[in-house]
Image: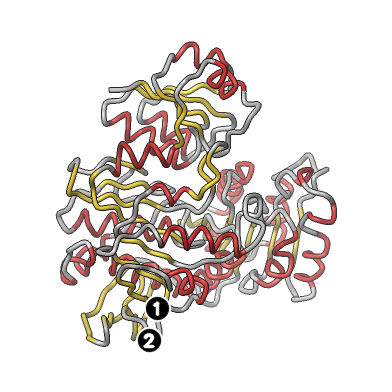
């Protein structure tokens, strides 16, 4: 077994892969800065030792056989510079996953701008419940497993499910991560513009997805969103079988007769026009119906029967930070957390929450943190995606100094546009030293009985969740 060191071990996929390889018998160490839950506690719970901060002394102390370089690590990092100067072996996380975890297994890869984590978790759970012990890599912690990555139960002829991110691989490999995962069964949920720090246009993203499709063998299968023209275009040159999923009759996999209650959604499934039967899944919103359709198609392509799939679905548990109910407090206040950060994800998440909590006001806290939402690329879309909310509080724009003033998200303009829609709006400014207590104060001042408070961020939101919990305890 090898000694493996992860530079940037706090990333979701990096930490999950580190734990899986530790369980497989490898000696694991690593380093990172500003680690926060759930990944910091995840590493500690699995006895993974890591250094806070980057230093060449860390590598000297660990003396690893292999160094995994996270895609957030760039030249100038002292550990990376030390490794290059001493000719130490460097690999990317996706390449390590392909070599050590996918190996000779059938590779199921879930891609798309939205829904990857939920869909990957669903496929893994359906195979697990169906008697197959798959390996998987999920960009979160799936509640059915309590780990984000594990090896397959078999070295060959088993299954490994990967969340296929289109983000780049490492400083020395600018290809999308999913190009490393050798897909046999592939899902494309949707394709939109995102990751403005590495893609300059939607066309560049399309190119990555076309390359991905070109990797699927003739005897493989591509499961694609039949209602997304960009995804269908990427699938058009596939050499394998293509199956579409959606809510329209043109799709091979179709959901009809959709109903929902507080336990989840129910719907009938048509496959090539034939009624397969009814399913129940503890998820909400049409976007999650689409995720479920894709997961069912992939699980059945892997050999499960419809009966096995339908038996497993009710026992699925959402990954953390995916419409996760943090708690219900006095005065009927409910706190919900979600990972949504792209305007489309924000819109569909808030629509699903509004439908689930019909008749209750939605109070939204949003952190502009991603490399796309901190710029003005989605200025218009961000003014439109909070429609279900009555009150909106924006966290500080993350590291705005990276961009010229004319490239940054214009929060003053955003505030004016949302107020013109009749919403109460608060913007945290860079100068405010009381952050994020300024948001807590705004929420307390505007909170009403029965409100649903929703936190949306792909980061820690400066510990806002715990501060809101403490604030809401006063109503108990």
Quarter assignment of residue 265: bottom left
Quadrant in the picture for the N terminus:
top left
As helix, strand or loop, the secondary structure at mark 1 comes to strand
Q: CA gap, disc 2 to disc 1?
A: 8 Å
The numbered disc on residue 250 is: 2
The numbered disc on residue 140 is: none
Image position of 388 with respect to 317: above or below = below
Mark 1 burial class by Cα count in 10 Å: few <14, some 14-19, many 20+: many
Q: Residue at x 28, y 69 (%)?
A: 297
Residue 232 versus residue 295: which sits nearer the camera? 232
Residue 338 versus residue 156: which sits nearer the camera? 156
Q: Position of residue 217 (x, y in %)?
A: 30, 60
Q: Residue at x 47, y 48 (%)?
A: 177
Q: Position of residue 252 (x, y in %)?
A: 31, 80
Q: Are marks 2 and 1 in contact (CB under 8 Å)?
A: yes
Coloring scheme used: secondary structure
| In the image: residue 149, left or right of residue 353 | left
Mark 2 burial class by Cα count in 10 Å: few <14, some 14-19, many 20+: some
Image position of 128 with respect to 59: above or below = below
| In the image: residue 382, left or right of residue 300 | right
- Residue behind mark 1: 246
Task: Report the mark closest to the observer, 2 or 1.
Answer: 2
As helix, strand or loop, the secondary structure at mark 2 comes to loop
Residue 430 versus residue 306: which sits nearer the camera? 306
Quarter assignment of residue 188: bottom left
Q: Position of residue 407 (x, y in %)?
A: 79, 55
Q: Residue at x 64, y 42 (%)?
A: 462
Image position of 211 with respect to 291: above or below = above
Image position of 59 with respect to 381: above or below = above
Q: Position of residue 216 (x, y in %)?
A: 34, 60
């Amino acid at each position: 077994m090898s000694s493996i060191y992860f530079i940037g071990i706090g990333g979701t996929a990096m930490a999950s892969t580190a734990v899986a390889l530790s369980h497989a018998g490898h000696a694991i160490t690593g380093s990172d800065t500003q680690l926060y839950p759930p990944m910091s506690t995840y590493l500690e719970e699995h006895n993974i030792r890591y250094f806070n901060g980057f230093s060449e002394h860390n590598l000297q102390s660990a003396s690893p056989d292999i160094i995994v370089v996270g895609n957030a690590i760039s030249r100038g990092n002292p550990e990376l510079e030390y490794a290059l100067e001493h000719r130490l072996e460097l690999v990317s996380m996706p390449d390590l996953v392909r070599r050590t975890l996918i190996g000779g297994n059938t590779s199921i890869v879930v891609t798309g701008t939205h829904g990857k984590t939920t869909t990957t978790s669903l496929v893994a759970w359906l195979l697990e419940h169906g008697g197959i012990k798959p390996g998987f890599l999920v960009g979160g912690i799936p509640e059915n497993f309590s780990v984000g990555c594990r090896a397959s139960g078999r070295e060959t002829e088993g299954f490994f499910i990967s969340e296929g991110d289109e983000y780049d691989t490492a400083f020395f490999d600018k290809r999308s991560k999913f190009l490393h995962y050798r897909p046999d069964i592939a899902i494309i949920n949707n394709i939109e513009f995102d990751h403005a720090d590495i893609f300059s246009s939607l066309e560049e993203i399309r190119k990555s997805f076309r390359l991905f499709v070109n990797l699927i063998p003739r005897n493989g299968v591509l499961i694609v969103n039949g209602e997304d023209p960009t995804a269908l275009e990427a699938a058009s040159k596939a050499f394998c079988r293509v199956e579409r999923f959606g809510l329209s009759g043109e799709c091979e996999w179709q959901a009809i007769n959709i109903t929902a209650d507080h336990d989840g959604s129910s719907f009938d499934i048509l496959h090539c026009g034939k009624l397969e039967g009814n399913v129940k899944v503890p998820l909400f919103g049409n976007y999650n119906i689409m995720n479920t359709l894709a997961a069912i198609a992939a699980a059945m392509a892997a050999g499960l029967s419809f009966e096995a799939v339908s038996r497993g679905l009710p026992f699925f548990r959402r990954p953390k930070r995916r419409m996760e109910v943090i708690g219900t407090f006095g005065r009927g206040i409910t706190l919900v957390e979600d990972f949504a950060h792209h305007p489309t994800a924000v819109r569909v998440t808030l629509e699903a929450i509004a439908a689930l909590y019909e008749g209750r006001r939605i109070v939204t806290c949003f952190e502009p943190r991603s490399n796309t939402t901190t710029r003005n690329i989605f200025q218009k879309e961000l003014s439109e995606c909070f429609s279900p909310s009555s009150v909106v509080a924006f966290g500080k724009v993350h590291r705005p100094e990276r961009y010229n003033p004319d490239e940054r998200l214009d929060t003053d303009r955003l505030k004016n546009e949302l107020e013109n829609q009749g919403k109460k709006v608060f913007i945290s400014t860079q100068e405010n030293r009381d952050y994020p207590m300024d948001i807590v104060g705004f929420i307390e001042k505007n909170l009403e009985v029965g409100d649903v408070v929703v936190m949306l961020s792909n980061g820690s939101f400066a510990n806002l969740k715990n501060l809101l919990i403490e604030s809401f305890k006063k109503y108990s």
